[in-house]
Amino acid sequence: MTALQLENITCRFAARGGLHVAVEHASVTVGEGEFVSLVGPTGCGKSTLLNAAAGLRRPDGGEVRVFGRPLAGRNEHAGYLFQGEALLPWRSARDNVAFGLALRAADPVQARATADDWLRRVGLAGHGDKYPHELSGGMRKRVALAQTLAVNPKILLMDEPFSALDVQTRVLMENELLALWQQDRKSVLFVTHDLEEAIALSDRVVVLGAGPASRPVGEFAIDLPRPRDVAEVRLTPRFLELHRQLWDCLRDEVMKAHATGMRADVQ
Amino acid sequence: MSSSAGLRLAQAGLLFALFALWHVLTRTEILPPFFFGEPLVVLDRIREWFVTGSIYPHLGVTLLETALAFVAGTVSGLGFGLWLGLSDTAARLLDPYIKALNAMPRVILAPIFAVWFGLGITSKVLLGVTLVFFIVFFSVFHGVREVNPTVLANARMLGASRAQLLRHVYLPSATAWVFASLHSAVGMAFVGAVIGEYLGSARGVGYLILQAEGVFDINTVFAGVLVLTVFALALDKLVTVAERRLLRWRPADGARGSH
């Protein structure tokens, strides 16, 4: 069964001088328990597709199906890990993690215990009383991850969640994400512009063409064995082979996006 | 810590120097004492007020008016700010009226309020409210529109309903903007109370000042102004203390934590 189906999605934005078509007739599916990454050049509408999957943005054409049912409004099965700072700055780390549970009117004592458990699982035991501004960028990202996972969504949507982190922290977070994912295999749609990250994490990578009006132009099954260590898997011959194949596909799109960007600059 | 103590000492020294200068200038009659008062007499008047207790009923009334205007203006400013900040239709409908009311010199309303609500404290409180309201209203109104969209989207994805967004996202961020405006609001609440008393009342520090002016008792006028200033400073301090307690989650070094 597929967890998430994006069928023929079209999204338009009002822009200077008319409508900007971000994605057109784009279809992506995520199977149950599958980790799928969306890669593509800058401005190709990756985040737009993700927002359509989350129900934060209603597509102008096409349909989103969640476990076979058409999506109307917010996707209640999905948790969303954002690229930017999404924590409530006035809540401590613990209260942030417990936020989703509090919204569901969970028992406060129970919610607190669950939150502490999640903080421990993301390596932040003992940091529960700190406010977001007292934590480093990597720690805040861990809190955000715990916050999203604490309500136990069946689908996980991630929008370049680690792009703001330094390289070392990033590798650590990727490994921790994989370890957590390995435990209960949620269905994941992961947006990134980093090809290596996509290959190291995913079961399948979907390459999105250059915008405007972009759609998937290639799909690659990643047959690297699991469990993986994202730092080590990058050194295997199979990884390099996959990387070459994917880059061959992506390169043309990046060039196109670059040329479009230049044209837009000239105009 | 010692540098902050040193700063306090320097500030007190500056105050003392200003009083000394005032004293010397009036004592040598470079400035005529009849128009500029004499600091020693002024301080003695204040001492006499507090020793005999004659100031208390007046001070009590003025402080009550100020506090009521402050609270009512803040709460209504917060409420309207949230409402118009969240409802685009209402904001666009009421926009010219809000601007017109804000542009109007509201002190002019004092005699009208006195006619409508009598010479008691109601007219003074209402005058203060009209001054406080707009300060708080505008800062909340603009603040609501600047709530971090990622924080909002995140709360929605975690399952927050519209009411829960208001309670858990908009209201806590509004608190930060309210406090930013409360320091000027305290002063405005005082202005409302004193101007109201000044234009027609039988009690209050503004009334005392008016009476003294009537008999050219400049020292009493200055004494009244000084007492008001001290209490305005004390109220401002109270706001700072409340701010520190309620906004503990903000970075202390002045970096903007609300965004």
Image: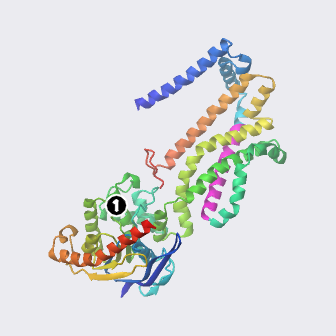
- Residue B215 position, x and y percent, is 81, 23
Q: Residue at x 72, y 40 (%)?
A: B193
Q: Secondary structure at mark 1?
A: loop
Disc 1 target residue: A164
Image-based side of B17 in relation to B101, left or right:
left
Image-based side of B102 in relation to B140, left or right:
right
Q: Quadrant of residue B15?
A: top right
Which is nearer the eye, B169 or A5? A5
Residue found farthest to the top: B28
Residue found farthest to the right: B115
Is any part of residue B246 visible from this angle? yes
Q: Magenta part of the protein: which range?
A: B61-86
Q: Is residue A73 above or below residue A2?
A: above
Q: Is residue A173 above or below residue B188?
A: below
Q: Quadrant of residue B84?
A: bottom right
- Residue A64 position, x and y percent, is 45, 83
Is any part of residue A131 visible from this angle? no
Chain letter behind tag 1? A
Q: Quadrant of residue A78?
A: bottom left
Question: Chief secondary structure of the magenta span?
Answer: helix
Image-based side of B219 in relation to A156, left or right:
right
Which is nearer the eye, A186 or B151? B151
Residue B221 belongs to magenta span: no
Q: Residue at x 54, y 24 (%)?
A: B14
Q: Residues within 10 Å of mark 1 (few under 14, many from 20)?
A: some
- Residue A82 position, x and y percent, is 40, 67
Check disc 1 and give the amino acid type. Answer: Ala
Which is nearer the eye, B82 or A213? A213
